[in-house]
Image: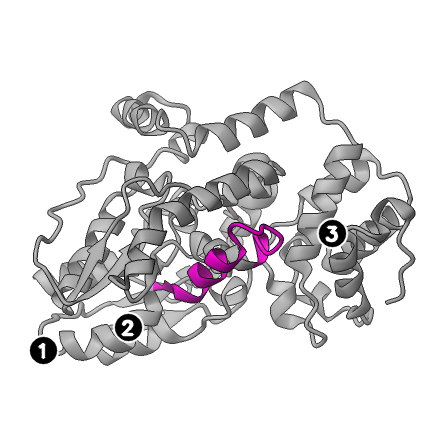
Amino acid sequence: MQTHLSPEFKDTPEGREAEAILRKCVHCGFCTATCPTYQVLGDELDGPRGRIYLIKQVLEGEQPTQKTQLHLDRCLTCRNCESTCPSGVEYGHLVDIGRRIVDEKVPRGASANALRWTLKEGLPSPLFAPAMKMGQAVRGLLPKVLQAKVPARQQAGILPSREHARKVLMLAGCVQPSMMPNINSATARVLDAAGIQTLIAPSAGCCGAVKFHLNDQVGGRAQMRANIDAWWPYVQSGRVEAIVMNASGCGVTVREYGHFLRHDAAYSAKAERISELTRDLSELLPDIVPALRGKVKAPAGLLAFHPPCSLQHGQQLRGGVEKYLGELGFTVRVALGESHLCCGSAGTYSVLHPEIAQELRDRKLGHLGELEPQAIVSANMGCIAHLQSGTRTPVRHWVEILDECLRS
């Protein structure tokens, strides 16, 4: 696709990156067939191809409107289109550029700004944990719409204390320790059983995705640098072999630190090294499974696996969970229909676009329910909370199930 950047963007790093991405576009439309919002809304401008043309127009000097902003906002950033694209278009990077530029040129209303500010400042804040604890204490009294965002209080269990020669860093995350603390402790226990010690850098926090994708890209990059600073002594000393992510949404962001900070002279090399070391928890299963054979009592029922978009599209990791848990005796299946589509969680998307998010959630649960599972498992806390809000079937992280079967 040929584009002629306006003088405003022609000689900027963002402009050059966008131009390079646009050159790969061939207008084939394969991405439209797998875009969740196009499936729901049926509007070309609510699919990747339409959004690409909107961004192209802005880069060529056309003034964006609130309608432009809305179509870009409605994108889940699930990156399904990247899995489908035969030309390798980095749509996720392009939409980040487009959203930042459009937000600078199109002011939002006071209520929209207030909500987005609350999300980007509140979720990574130290005040989130006490606020969540208070919400859980009165959960039964909350309106249903709020109950869906406040999971029942969860016991984390005991963290292992054994030393192992093999060590990994784990990102605790910004909201996961407060909302679903057992995911982190279950991860540490499973790795401990496989002879791997889990370390957590106390000053590491939000991966930066919340602020970045709400267009506080300066704040998002600041959080990325803070995490690099927290991890770097462990990395530089050679104490750890990997940085493990049990929330695939964080994983896809940390794996791209090298991209996000590539123009930062002080951090670009460090960021690239952090990206190289980052592994989703499922990527450790080839090491975990041999160590756990004979120690796991797998359940008799079927587990329905929802692979998050951040895992299968953002990180291009597919099939590992089903394959390796199957080797331990678990029966794990993905939905027969639309297993590639987003569940509608997508970070803060379910708060900002609840109607689309709920339609995608119910569509996803319908396909998963056809398997008649004893539980639904996933690999991202956001997906787990969102799916659980629409079903009585337990929805959990796969590592929690493995941990329970290891201890039973």
Where is mark 2, residue-wise?
285
In this view, the mark in front (3 or 1): 3
In this view, the mark in front (2 or 1): 2
Front-most of residues 108 and 224: 224
Looking at the image, residue 44 sits to the left or right of residue 297; the answer is right
Where is mark 1, residue-wise?
294
Question: Relative to 62, is 241 above or below?
Answer: below
Amino acid residing under circle 2: Leu
Q: How many marks?
A: 3
Looking at the image, residue 102 sits to the left or right of residue 388; the answer is right
Q: x and y percent of residue 140 in the render? A: 30, 25
Magenta includes 269?
yes
Q: Residue drawn at (51%, 55%), measured in percent from left and top?
A: 257
For the magenta stretch, what is the residue range? 259-280
Front-most of residues 312 and 395: 312
Q: Secondary structure at mark 2?
A: helix
Magenta includes 7?
no
In the rendered structure, which disc, 2 or 1, sits on the residue that comes first in sequence?
2
Picture disc at residue 20: none
Question: Relative to 388, is 122 above or below?
Answer: above
Q: x and y percent of residue 253 in the render? A: 50, 54
In the rendered structure, which disc, 2 or 3, sits on the residue that comes first in sequence?
3
Looking at the image, residue 395 sits to the left or right of residue 347; the answer is left
Q: Residue drawn at (24%, 80%), measured in percent from left and top?
A: 327
Amino acid residing under circle 3: Glu
Tell me the distance, in whole angstroms, between the alpha carbons under discs 2 and 3. 38 Å
